[in-house]
Each structure stands twice: as C-alpha cells, then as structure tokens.
Amino acid sequence: MITTAIALLITIQAPQQDSTNPTKLSASQIMSKVFSRYASAQTISGTVKMSQTARDVTVHINTELQYERPGKIYIHQARDGSHPQQWLLTSDGREFSYDRPEGAFGRDRFVEWVSQNGVDQKIQDLYMAAEKSLGEQNAVLDIAVSQPNRLKLLLKQWATLSYDGRVTVNGDQVHKITGQYRENVDLPPAGTYEIDVSENYDLVRYITDERRVFSVPKQGAVELNLHTEWDSNLQVGAKVQPNLFRVVK
C-alpha cells in the first residue's frame, strides 16, 4: 500500500526539471524519496510545530511524535491560545488508547486491542483510529506515519508540483518544492503550498497559504486568508523512550 502511494506520486505528477538542481532530480522524484524514507523507518522521534494565522490571530499546536514499528506509537498534541487543549494517543503494541472522540459518549479515554479479529494493526492504522481524537492530522504526520489513504489525499491536494531550487531554512540548505493547493479536490486550487526537504530527504517544513470560507456566528460566511506552517525536527532512526508507549487509560 505504501509503495502504491509512492508510485502514484511519480505517475501523477509530471517531472519538473530545473537547471538550478545539481542532482537533476524532479520535484516528484524528491518527494518519492521522502515518502520512501519515512515508509521504511523503523523508529522516529521528534516534534512538529504548527503555527496558523488568520486576521492577525495566531494559534499553535505542538506535536510530539514517537513510534517503533510495527505497533508502538506516542502522539501528544497541545494547543495554546484562548482555548487551550491537549490530546494523546499511546500504544505499547498490545493495547492502544486515545481521547474520547468529539460527539461520542463514554469514558474520557477509549482503550482497544492492537490485534483485532486476528489482524495486527500497524501504527498507520492506530493513527487513523484516533483521527477524530487528535488536535490535527497534518501532511508532516501523514508522511511520517505513512498512512496510505492520507498520502493519496495529500497528492490530490497538490494540484501542481514544481522544483524551485535550493533555499536556506534555519541555517541549512534545503530543496524547495512549490505548487497550487486545494483543500477540496473537487474544487479548483485556492492557494499555494511549499515543501522544504533536507539533503537527506527529511521533511523540514510544510507551508500552505489559502483562501477559506468559514461560518462565523452573527456574520455568516466569511472568507479569510489562512497561512499555516509546520516545522519538523523528526529524526528517522532515533532512539525511542519506551516509557512513552505506556497505555494511558
């Protein structure tokens, strides 16, 4: 399933050669290497920091991610601002737990077996089981966890894919990839995105700029410019902390 998503990237997106790219790689080839790097990772540890701004109001969500394939994962998210909140997904490979989904009834945390109906769920399955119990699922997490359906959706949101050469991000040289972005694949593009990739094909930063329509009380439909950045320092092959996988009930 992972290789299908990677093949889809190479097939759907037309290669974009750029004379400023010494490696002669196209944007799609660079991203396929990124997908492959995370899909083959046995362990990952680090953080993803999201910053989203609209009308001069900024909200942050910080995500701590750690996993050890096939079935151990830890995701902790914290949002600041006027409505702070935290979310937690943990799995020790035998059981996993997550916050009660919005609109559901029962305990504050739901606990399930990793093995269900004779099938051992993988970290990408647990990630999707907690889909409605996390503060956000974003492109960086989707790629890091290598969830096939989320990757396919991501590829559809990237209406175009172009290589823009090398730029400096946080003092390091990275590959810059840009294109037109669409939140809903059934609508025309209404924004742009930027992906910054290290020389080792680590995902360093992901940015989207888009026009979105929101329903605001007493105002009705309001169109806003939405700028979102995700900064990642996820380390492939990092040593994990076993205690973080403890199932919190």
Image (spheres, rainbow, N blue to C red):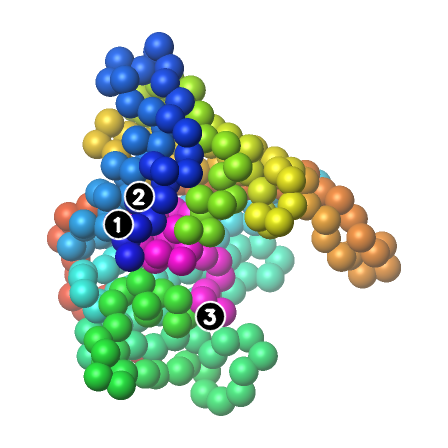
Give, as a three-letter code, the residue at label 2.
Ala
Circle 3 crowding by C-alpha within 10 Å: few under 14, some 14–19, many from 20: many
Seen at 44% across and 44% down, the residue is 155
142 drawn magenta: yes
Residue 121: x percent and y percent? 26, 73
Callout 1: SS:
helix
Relative to residue 190, is residue 23 drawn left or right? Answer: left
Residue identifier under label 3: 133
Of 138 and 170, nearer the camera is 138
Image quarter in which the C terminus is found = bottom left
In the orientation shown, which residue stands out farthest toward the top? 19
Callout 2: SS:
helix
Tell me the distance, in whole angstroms, between the alpha carbons under discs 1 and 2: 6 Å
Q: Is residue 39 visible?
A: yes
Looking at the image, is 152 positioned above or below residue 10? below
Seen at 32% across and 83% down, the residue is 112
Residue 20: x percent and y percent? 35, 11
Of 215 and 27, nearer the camera is 27
Whether label 1 touches label 2, CB < 8 Å: yes
Give, as a three-letter code, the residue at label 3.
Ser
Give the magenta part as a residue range: 131-151
Earlier in the chain: of badge 3 and badge 2, it is: 2
- Which disc, if any, is residue 3? 1
Residue 119: x percent and y percent? 23, 78
Residue 167: x percent and y percent? 38, 19
